[in-house]
Amino acid sequence: MRNPLTAGKTAGSCLVVPREGKCPGVLVLHSWWGPTPFFKNLCNQLADEGFVALAPDLYHGATASTIDKAKNLRSKLKNTIVVKEITAAVEHLRSHQGVSGNKIGVLGFSLGGCWALGLAGLKPDDVAAVVVFYGTRTMNCAKTRAAFLGHFAEDDKWASVKRVHQLEEKMRSAGKEVTFHIYPKTNHWFFEEDRPEAYNPEAAEQAWQRSIEFLRNKLT
């Protein structure tokens, strides 16, 4: 059972809390499509698995259905504002009465995956586990204390296998706990069932099960 609640001041934000007892918190950072129904439903799925899920709306109510529209929305984001909003979301989630423990997990997709990686360094005392779907970035690993799990496509022009391996090696060299999976015969957005041009149900299910096991292991 779950109790869906609206979080924050923007229409697209979503907070879903399991009804029974306190549970670990997981922050969900959407891809450049914005807070579409897929990501809101993902919060419901996380709650069904025993997590308090919060998905902040970085686009303040807007969503995109095409790549051009998504690029336009992404271009309007201001990094300083995004940092302020996602760090505030971390504090909101940690302080929620339904959340157990002092640390949370972060689940990020593409654009949101890049922010999830950055958040591990911005809030090292608060973020214990980071799950990234097809998102990479240049990052300083020195401050991060989280464990990392990554899901990447074999054929991805935005997050190439070469870049994935480079990021993984950098994390390992810095002494971080990291496991990256590359899924054969997949493309960017392979996890998102509302992207029929890329969705791969078998890979998506495997990535989901791995993610839930990882989050439970690191947060409970």
Image (tube, rainbow, N blue to C red):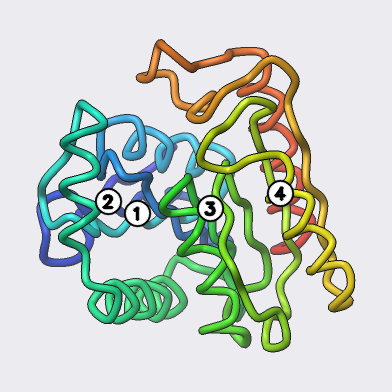
Label 3 vs label 2: CA separation? 14 Å
Closest to the observer: 182 or 14?
182
Residue bearing the label numbered 4? 164
Where is the N terminus found, in terms of image quarters?
top left
- The image's mark for residue 148 is none
Amino acid type for the residue under numbered disc 2: Cys
Dot 4 or dot 1, earlier in sequence: 1
**Discs 3/4, front:** 4
Front of the two marks 4 and 1? 4
Q: Disc 3 and disc 4: Cα gap in Å?
A: 17 Å
Front of the two marks 3 and 2: 3
Give the answer, above or below, for where 202 lies relative to 165.
above
Left or right: 73 in relation to 17: left
| Three-letter code, disc 3 | Leu
Q: Do the residues under discs 1 and 2 have CB atoms within 8 angstroms?
A: yes
Work out how far the residue at label 4 is from the one at label 1, CA to CA, in angstroms.
Answer: 25 Å
Measured Cα–Cα span from mark 2 to mark 4: 30 Å
Identity, as a three-letter code, of the amino acid under mark 4: Val
Q: Mark 2 = which residue?
A: 14
Q: Amino acid at mark 1?
A: Ala
Disc 1 versus disc 2: distance between alpha carbons? Answer: 5 Å
Q: What kind of element bears circle 3?
A: strand
Q: Classify 10 Å Cα crowding around label 2: few (below 14), some (14-19), many (20 and above).
A: many
* Residue placed under numbered mark 3 in the picture: 107
In the image, what residue occupies the spot 40% across and 81% down?
91
Q: Which residue is tagged 1?
A: 55
**Number of other residues with Cα within 10 Å of mark 3, as a class: few under 14, some 14 to 19, many 20 or more:** many
User: Which of marks 3 and 1 precedes in the sequence?
Assistant: 1
Q: Quadrant of residue 49?
A: top right
